[in-house]
Amino acid sequence: MPILWDEGVESVHINSVHIGRAVYCANCEMITDSVGDKCIICGSKSLESIERMLRRQNGYCKIA
Ligand SMILES: [Zn+2]
């Protein structure tokens, strides 16, 4: 019989994507680190770089 504490630890998932690689898909509304111009979730080409979005909206500037 599994111990409850062990189950809790196993169920913890941390997903992180570096901002320079993060892309937002306007079709499925997911943020992924899709490589290329297609969303790895839905295959849509409606991808936008998160870094670019932030820079445009907030004057945010990082990463040369
Ligand atoms: Zn998508």
Image: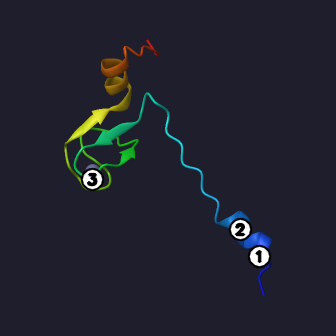
User: Which residue shows up at 20% across the image and 42% down it?
Assistant: 46
- Quarter holding the C terminus? top left
Residue type for callout 3: Cys
Q: Residue furthest bottom?
A: 1
Residue type for callout 1: Leu
What is the secondary structure assignment of the residue under circle 1? helix
Q: 60 or 21: nearer the eye?
A: 60
Numbered tag placed on residue 28 in the rendering: 3
Q: Residues within 10 Å of mark 1 (few under 14, many from 20)?
A: few
Q: Residues within 10 Å of mark 2 (few under 14, many from 20)?
A: few
The reply to whether discs 1 and 2 touch (Cβ–Cβ < 8 Å) is yes
Q: CA distance from mark 1 to mark 2?
A: 6 Å
What is the secondary structure assignment of the residue under circle 3? loop
Residue 52: % across, % down: 33, 23
Q: 38 or 47: nearer the eye?
A: 47
Where is mark 1, residue-wise? 4
Residue 24: % across, % down: 32, 40
Q: Quadrant of residue 26?
A: top left
Left/right placement of residue 34 relative to residue 27 reads right
Above or below, comparing residue 11 to residue 4 in the picture: above
Above or below, comparing residue 42 to residue 57 in the picture: below
Above or below, comparing residue 64 to residue 12 in the picture: above
